[in-house]
Image (cartoon, rainbow, N blue to C red):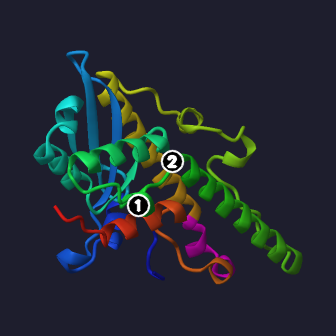
Amino acid sequence: MADTTLESPDELDAALAKPTADAFAPGNAVVALGSDETGGEALAVWQLSPSARPTGAWVLALPELMHSREQARRVLVLLERRAITAKHIDIVDAFLDQLSVAAELGTTSWWKEQAFSPLFALQDILARRAAMEKTVAAAKQQRKNIVALSWARDLAAETPPEDFDGVRRLAGVAQAPGTPVASEALTVSRVLHWLAQKWAETEQVKNRRSYVNGAHGNPELLPPSWLDAVQTAADTRLPL
């Protein structure tokens, strides 16, 4: 999209929303497992817009979901057509495999192409910035008036995170208050919002420097691994 500036969450959300209901990209869903206010095992589902702004939240007793076809299917409705993530991506695989069985969908692994990792999204950001810096450095060899890229925060200069908690600390996001299960879902959601902001900051360079746009294409709406999950999810329907 040549006219996409990515300067606001509203613009990102609007860019991913398409005219018809069937083509609309609902966004993201964060899943978390942990204890609720009673101390019992629970599931938290946080629905987010494409730019990771909260649009809905549910905390549900886990044992009931796994023993009720109807309730399992209600949860799948919350996740259907959304890119799905969690603090640890393995949670998505293990949980959705069990939930799909409980919902009598079988183990189809329907979620595989619409699951994404916050850690991989950060790696996408770092890779894109490194590629842009290389392009700018090459241009500077030809034109001395080219100014090196300067980021509001040089993420590449900091220790690369190895897991979600490392990404959270890099983002400066504190563990959210609340019950363990709700706290985890909210914390992941806040990290995703930070990642979306850092990506937008990165891609805006394409609007300011035509030679960067020429080398790397028009601004993309989200980190590639995350955007692929959102767009794949938008076209995925479950037989519910």
The residue tagged with tag 1: helix, strand or loop? helix
Could you tell me the amino acid type at mark 2? Pro
Find out whether residue 206 is within the magenta segment.
yes
Q: Nearer the viewer, mark 2 or mark 1?
A: 1
Residue 159 position within the rendered picture, expressed as x and y whole percent measured from the top left:
72, 37
Q: Which residue is mark 1?
A: 114
Quarter occupied by the C terminus: bottom left
Above or below 227: residue 35? above
Residue 31 position within the rendered picture, expressed as x and y whole percent measured from the top left:
34, 42
Find out whether residue 127 is within the magenta segment.
no
Q: What secondary structure is the magenta-colored segment mainly?
A: helix
Left or right: where 11 falls relative to 143 = left
Q: Residue at x 53, y 65 (%)?
A: 224
Above or below 115: residue 141? below
- Residues rendered magenta in the picture: 203-212
Q: Is residue 154 visible?
A: no
Left or right: where 236 falls relative to 232 = left
The residue tagged with tag 2: helix, strand or loop? helix
In this view, the residue in front, 59 or 139, is 59
Could you tell me the amino acid type at mark 1? Gln
Residue 213 position within the rendered picture, expressed as x and y whole percent measured from the top left:
62, 79
Real-space CA distance between mark 2 and mark 1, rounded to the nearest whole angstrom:
13 Å
Residue, far right: 141
Q: Which residue is mark 2?
A: 118
Above or below 222: residue 235? below
